[in-house]
């Protein structure tokens, strides 16, 4: 199966600004997030495809390479390798903003983890 064009995946034009790409990503990622669509394999597949497209297009260097060579820019040795190298932490902070996740993770174990480090040092 060949991959769809990343601009098509996000529903933006090739000359879209960074902010337009980010906005499209956020909207699509929220709508297709696995937590919002439990047991929906199609939504999960779309979510991964949306994230892969955004990971490429948000970075000026990878976007330029993609614009010039398409998916071939990331195939072969040293290439992205598809979904397996996807960084979900960055994707979530891009979707919802890092402040929300910093607050959540600090409140749900951040202090506990810091406490364990102190104990380990004693």
Image (cartoon, rainbow, N blue to C red):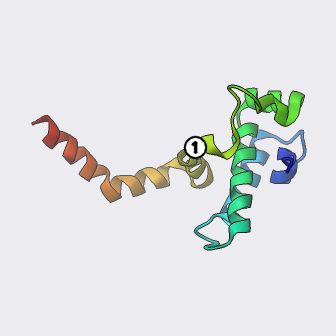
Residue 122, percent across and down? 9, 36
Question: In the displayed structure, does residue 72 sit left or right of residue 101?
Answer: right
Whether 63 is drawn above or below 10: the answer is above
**Residue bearing mark 1:** 87
How many labels were placed on the picture? 1
Residue 19, percent across and down? 74, 44
Query: How packed is label 1: few (under 14 Cα within 10 Å), some, or many (20 or more)?
Result: few
Residue 33, percent across and down? 64, 64
Q: Secondary structure at mark 1?
A: loop
Q: Residue at 31%, 55% (x, y): give it.
A: 109
Residue 60, percent across and down? 74, 29
Q: Residue at 61%, 73% (x, y): give it.
A: 38
Question: In the displayed structure, does residue 70 sit left or right of residue 52?
Answer: right
Q: Residue at 47%, 53% (x, y): give it.
A: 101
Whether 34 is drawn above or below 3: the answer is below
Occupied quadrant, residue 119? top left
Q: Nearer the viewer, residue 87 or 60?
A: 87
Question: In the displayed structure, does residue 60 sit left or right of residue 118?
Answer: right
Q: Residue at 70%, 42% (x, y): give it.
A: 82
């Amino acid at each position: 199966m060949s991959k769809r064009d990343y601009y098509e995946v996000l529903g933006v034009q090739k000359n879209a600004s960074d902010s337009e790409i980010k906005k499209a990503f956020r909207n699509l990622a929220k709508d297709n997030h696995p937590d919002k669509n439990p047991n929906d394999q199609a939504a999960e597949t779309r979510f991964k495809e949306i994230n892969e497209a955004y990971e490429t297009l948000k970075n000026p260097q990878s976007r330029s390479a993609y614009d010039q060579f398409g998916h071939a820019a990331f195939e072969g040795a040293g290439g992205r390798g598809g979904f397996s190298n996807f960084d979900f932490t960055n994707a979530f902070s891009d979707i919802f903003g890092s402040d929300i996740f910093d607050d959540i993770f600090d409140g749900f174990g951040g202090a506990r983890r810091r406490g364990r480090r102190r104990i380990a040092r004693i």
